[in-house]
Amino acid sequence: MKAPSKIESLADLRELQRAMAGALFLPLTEADRMQRANTKTANAIIAPNDRLTSFERLEIYNRQYWFRLLDCLYDDFPGLRAVLGGRRFHKLCRAYLAKYPSESFTLRNLGSRLPQFIRDEPQWTAPRQPIALDMVAFEWAQIVAFDSAALPPFTADDFLGQNPAELRLALQPHITLLSLDYPVDHMVMALKERTATRGDASNAVGEPASHKASRAIRIPNTERVFVAVHRHELDLYYKRLEPEAFALLCALRNGATLEAACEQAILGATREAAGWPAQIRAWFENWAALGWFVRHESISKNNP
């Protein structure tokens, strides 16, 4: 985008703004410096001073823009950074932002396409792609849980008089159900505890953690894990689920009636059938107390 030589109208101002934005959004070099392709734009829109050239002055803004985006990804995906190590995570983030630049008014959405990017381009996380996929899904679910909507809950009393063969329930928008191959929930808890311990050990002020070349952590053995990531009373939680409970909640989320969801959950279960009514009742008492359920039509109204 060519910058106008003079600003004599609103149209000229818009052209200047577009030129500036184009310069800022241009990805950095491998050395995290501004590309020389911005030289003409810099000379057109920024005057040099006695210390810095036009290029150097524009580079400050270009680098700070990209460092801000990178810092957001560092903050939102610390578990993924631990899985890959600092240098590989930095390269992954740069490649991701080059393909999927920020397009939202809020940085909350910056990492929304990172799970898909890792699936589509495994070279950035190989040979750790399987655990990277689990970790990025888990950490994105935390972002969803933190600030997604909370609708009026379907309470335990609301179940009274309902026909299970007709009743359809949905889950709160902030709940994500995950089927994982690694215990990433426990990994994240361990990382948080380790970070807190290191932070308490010293009051020294040093380089920000996001800019350090941290080593990748040791990968645990595979373990089939079912997790619900949710919010309760403004706090973030993740709750492990039994396989049958996970299947039941997935069936409800997918539109099954209460009766059909319960049947799907216990189909093929090894536990004796006589114990299932009490178990399902206990699950529903807990989930209703947490406010997980909403009326099925509430989701439809909020997602036209």
Image (spheres, rainbow, N blue to C red):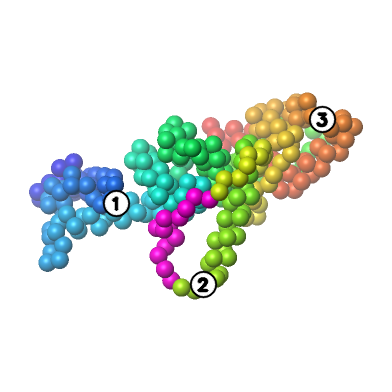
Q: Give how far across and how far down residue 59 sits, in percent.
A: 23, 54
Q: Give how far across and how far down residue 246 sits, in percent.
A: 70, 36
Q: Upstream in the sequence, badge 2 or badge 3?
A: 2
Relative placement, left or right, of 39 versus 184 is left
Can residue 258 be seen here? no
Dot 2 falls on a residue whose secondary structure is loop
Relative placement, left or right, of 121 versus 246 is left
- The one of 121 and 85 positioned closer to us in this rendering: 85
Q: CA distance from mark 2 to mark 3?
A: 52 Å
Magenta region's main secondary structure? loop
- Residue shown at the point (18%, 41%) measured from the top left: 1
Mark 2 or 3: the one toward you: 2
Question: Splitting the image into 4 quarters, where does residue 205 fall?
Answer: bottom left
Dot 1 falls on a residue whose secondary structure is loop
> Is residue 58 a member of the stretch shown in magenta?
no
Residue extending farthest to the bottom is 203
Relative placement, left or right, of 1 versus 246 is left
Residue identified by numbered label 2: 202
Dot 3 falls on a residue whose secondary structure is loop
Residue identified by numbered label 1: 32
User: For the residue marked with disc 1, what is the amino acid?
Assistant: Asp
Query: Looking at the image, is 169 positioned above or below residue 43?
Result: above
- The one of 100 and 180 positioned closer to us in this rendering: 180
Q: Upstream in the sequence, badge 3 or badge 1?
A: 1
Residue identified by numbered label 3: 270
User: For the residue marked with disc 3, what is the amino acid?
Assistant: Thr
Residues in magenta, as a range: 205-217
User: For the residue marked with disc 2, what is the amino acid?
Assistant: Ser
Q: Are marks 2 and 3 in contact (CB under 8 Å)?
A: no
